[in-house]
Amino acid sequence: MRLIYVAGKGGVGKSVCSASTALWSAGQGKETLVFSMDPAHSLSDILESELGDSPAMIGQHLSAYEPSVEKEARIFFSRYRHMFNALFSLFEVEVRPQDMAQFPGVAEMVFMDRLYDVYMEGMYEVVVIDSAPTAMVLPLLQLPAVTTGLVSRMLGIKNKWMGLLNMLEPGFGDSIVSEARRLRIKAETMRNALLDKSTASLTVVTIPEKAAVMETVRLIETVESHGVTVDSMIINHVLGGDCQCQFCRRKRDSQADHMATLKRMYAEKRIACLLDQGGEVRGSTLDSVAQELYGQGQLRLEP
Ligand SMILES: Nc1ncnc2c1ncn2[C@@H]1O[C@H](COP(=O)(O)OP(=O)(O)O)[C@@H](O)[C@H]1O
Ligand SMILES: [Mg+2]
């Protein structure tokens, strides 16, 4: 299985690029899933398909999945309820299942859990991950450390309180520990998958503007320092045409400078330029974007 993680700041075109990548991959006959990790989903809109709680087949070789954080958080909560109850009572807070989704880190855990299932089922050759603006890849990488802390805490509780916990409810203490362990194994598995060059790579989407370029440089630095491979970059919203008005000329010149900077800095990466399509990209326009990115050989699906 190949995981293509699409990251970048908000509004640069991650969802459009993820959908187009998935479309291209499916067009190559590869069983493909495009998976949204953005709590504010937009894939269904872009793909013009109703997407639900489980991967939905929306075309030949193509499935899409937008897990609902609220719903999954509830399920997640009930799946790990012993652990969460123990944890929250430790901090003396009461949490209702419906509030779970609002907790920091919960969206990451939920998506990690869903992605883990997709990964373990192994039904797809290519999984394209459309991420949230903050590049959830970092929280995902840090999850094992977080859960390690959790497990150690639980084991701490275990030694101190196990007898008491088991007295409250038979097996209560044991289930807390086994749930925490289970969670840790999942987080560890996904982290290893993301760090494995032959499995996962990250495609950064950016636009040729100063602030975006600076943010991209920081993003690449951060994820690479964690060992994740960034092999491709898409510079989106490039102004095409040959309009000679002052506005267009100035914009093209400024964009050219930023593109040159990125190409110089990241000569070893595949860098694709994607023209501004002059209107929202969805439905059939995705095909021409896919053609521009992959059909013209700017990017490749293979590592
Ligand atoms: N190359 C492009 N040309 C024209 N519009 C684009 C292009 N890429 C993205 N868009 C539009 O920009 C908006 C944001 O794109 P989206 O993929 O949702 O960004 P993100 O997922 O990074 O937040 C959408 O309305 C989309 O149709
Ligand atoms: Mg998006």
Image (cartoon, helix red, strand yellow):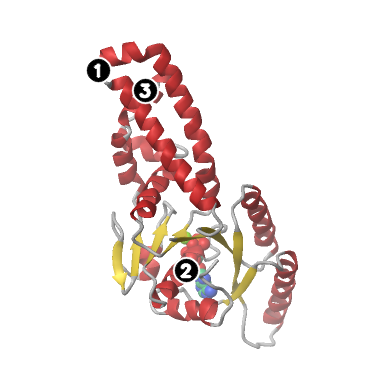
Residue that badge 2 annotates? 16
Q: Which residue occupies 30% across, 69% down?
A: 58
Q: Nearer the viewer, mark 1 or mark 3?
A: 1
| Mark 1–mark 2 distance (CA, rounded to whole Å) | 50 Å
* Disc 3: which residue: 86
Q: Quadrant of the N terminus?
A: bottom left
**Mark 2 near ligand 1 (CB under 8 Å)?**
yes
Marks 1 and 2, the one that precedes in the sequence: 2
Mark 1 sits near ligand 2, with its Cβ under 8 Å away: no
Eyeballing the image, is 129 above or below 289? above
Residue located beneath label 1 in the image: 169
Image height of 222 relative to 279, above or below: above
Q: Earlier in the sequence, mark 1 or mark 3?
A: 3
Q: Residues within 10 Å of mark 1 (few under 14, many from 20)?
A: few
Instruction: Say which residue appears at 64% left-offset and 55% top-offset.
Output: 220
Q: How many marks?
A: 3
Front residue of this view, candidates 136 and 97: 136
Location of residue 175 by image quarter: top left
List x then y, in percent, for residue 200.
52, 58
Residue 277 seen in the figure: no
Q: Nearer the viewer, mark 2 or mark 3?
A: 3
